[in-house]
Image (cartoon, rainbow, N blue to C red):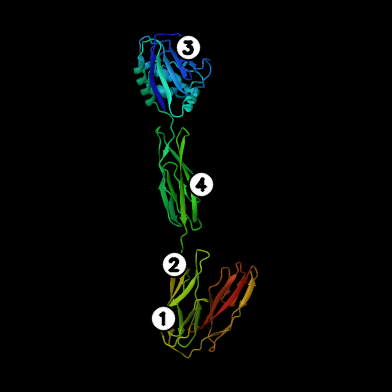
């Protein structure tokens, strides 16, 4: 902050030595003595003393004094503006010329010392919050009160380099899979165009550098807390920043039950099949159940196996459900039961359990007989990933890669009646 205050007037014109002496009387001040030798906006000769009577160093922390010398026409306003122009030096000279218009066009003149700006900033920093600028008149031509007002007006009208000011931002929370968006904004006192950037952007997040719009849809592996810093920059390389915390909540996803085919069977013949489901959230424990089981039918939740020997023709619907404790999925199984006939159902041979290590081949064939000699067709349900079943040779082959217990159901049909057996395969690591 600059504070301009009036000093005293005297009648000593163009006497640098005497002016310096007067400055030394004001001990511990940072003094500028200005001589307007051309009058009305002419050349300014700058003398600087620090009040310690050595005339060479600038080490004061009190403030700045402007001594206005002779102005042939007594132009107080112009002299005050010229004084400020001399103090600030080259750092702000062109900005000041734009604001004042009356500054001299002869920029080759020695209008300021090389160190004027550095010394001015050092004095302002040492003064912490206020740099006192006191105006004196050494010849009695100018009015120090009018000059004080003019210099204050010049200072207030000058555009100083100031950083942008960013608006405050709250912290945010969002669920996995949901979109989060907001806009960061800032005001620039200089009217500069602002560019927005961010540090620690999470994977998949974006920030528009022109509009400040932030957008992110965290995926289902990104639950956690994220600390971001948003930055606004202007053309002067000045910045402001704000920190934001984003909490991403884990979002449970529903299990998905595999499709269940339509089954057709004759009354008094057995039907067996199992169901399966998957869950996109690894680690979820799945529980299975069945609704509206026909009379005499059973469902084992552990093996997910349905068994039934119907005695009455008709169409039956069984609802199978899977749950991870929070979310669920269900599928309907349609079972068509025809009347009993003399056709004998095919009979599939029992299939033993198998144990194999990952990376090792397991293969076997399934067999069935039909009491009527009917042509038989085969298929398999719940084949593991990578496994194959040749329906012509009835051979199953698989080289497992993941340890676990796998249940594969094989079915044989004579086009009217069916029989099924389930093979259990234990895969060891």
Image location of residue 356, percent across then percent down: 64, 72
Calculate the distance from the C-alpha at mark 1 to the C-alpha at mark 3.
116 Å
Q: Residues within 10 Å of mark 1 (few under 14, many from 20)?
A: some
Mark 1, residue position: 316
* Mark 1: secondary structure: strand
Q: The C terminus is located in which quarter?
A: bottom right
Calculate the distance from the C-alpha at mark 3 to the C-alpha at mark 4.
60 Å
Q: Residue at image x 44%, y 15%? A: 106
Q: Horizontally, is 182 left or right of 48 in the view?
A: left
Q: Is residue 314 above or below residue 170?
A: below
* Mark 2: secondary structure: loop
Q: Residues within 10 Å of mark 4 (few under 14, many from 20)?
A: few
Which tag is nearer the camera, tag 1 or tag 4? 4
Mark 4, residue position: 200
Residue 43 seen anywhere in this rendered image of the structure: no
Mark 2, residue position: 327
Q: Which mark is residue 21?
A: 3
Q: Residue at image x 50%, y 81%? A: 272
Image location of residue 401, percent across then percent down: 61, 67
Calculate the distance from the C-alpha at mark 1 to the C-alpha at mark 2.
26 Å
Which tag is nearer the camera, tag 3 or tag 4? 3
Q: Residues within 10 Å of mark 2 (few under 14, many from 20)?
A: few
Q: Residues within 10 Å of mark 3 (few under 14, many from 20)?
A: some
Calculate the distance from the C-alpha at mark 4 to the C-alpha at mark 2.
34 Å
């Amino acid at each position: 902050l600059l504070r301009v205050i009036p000093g005293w007037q005297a009648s000593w014109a163009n006497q640098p030595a005497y002016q310096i002496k007067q400055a030394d009387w004001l001990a511990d001040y940072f003094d500028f003595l200005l001589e307007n030798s051309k009058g009305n906006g002419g050349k300014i000769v700058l003398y600087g003393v620090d009040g310690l009577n050595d005339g060479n160093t600038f080490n004061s922390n009190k403030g700045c004094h402007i001594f206005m010398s002779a102005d042939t026409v007594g132009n107080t306003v112009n002299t005050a503006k010229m004084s400020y122009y001399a103090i600030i030096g080259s750092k702000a000279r062109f900005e000041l010329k734009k604001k004042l218009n009356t500054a001299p066009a002869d920029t080759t003149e020695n209008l300021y010392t090389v160190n004027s700006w550095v010394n001015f900033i050092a004095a302002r920093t040492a003064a912490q919050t206020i740099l006192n600028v006191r105006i004196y008149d050494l010849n009695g031509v100018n009015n120090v009160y009018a000059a004080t007002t003019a210099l204050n007006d010049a200072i207030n009208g000058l555009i100083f380099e100031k950083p942008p000011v960013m608006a405050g931002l709250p912290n945010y929370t969002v669920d996995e899979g949901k979109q989060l968006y907001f806009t960061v904004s800032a005001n620039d006192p200089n009217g500069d165009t602002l560019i927005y950037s961010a540090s620690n952007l999470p994977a998949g997040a974006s920030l528009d550098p022109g509009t400040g719009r932030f957008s992110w849809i965290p995926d289902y592996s990104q639950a956690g807390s994220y600390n971001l810093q948003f930055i606004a920059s202007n053309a002067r390389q000045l910045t402001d920043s704000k920190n934001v915390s984003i909490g991403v909540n884990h979002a449970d996803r529903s299990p998905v039950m595999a499709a269940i085919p339509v089954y057709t069977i004759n009354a008094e013949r057995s039907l067996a099949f199992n169901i399966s489901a998957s869950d996109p959230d690894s680690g979820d424990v799945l529980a299975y159940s069945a609704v509206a089981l026909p009379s005499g039918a059973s469902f084992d939740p552990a093996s997910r196996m349905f068994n039934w020997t119907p005695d009455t023709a008709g169409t039956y619907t069984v609802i199978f459900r899977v749950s991870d404790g929070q979310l669920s999925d269900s599928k309907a199984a349609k079972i068509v039961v025809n009347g009993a006939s003399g056709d004998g159902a095919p009979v599939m041979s029992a299939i033993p359990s198998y144990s194999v290590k990952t990376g090792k081949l397991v293969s076997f064939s399934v067999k069935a007989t039909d009491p009527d000699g009917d042509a038989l067709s085969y298929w398999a349900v719940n084949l593991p990933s990578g496994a194959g079943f040749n329906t012509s040779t009835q051979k199953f082959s698989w080289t497992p890669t993941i340890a676990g217990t796998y249940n594969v159901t094989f079915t044989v049909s004579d086009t009217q009646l069916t029989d099924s057996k389930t093979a259990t395969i234990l895969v060891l690591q």
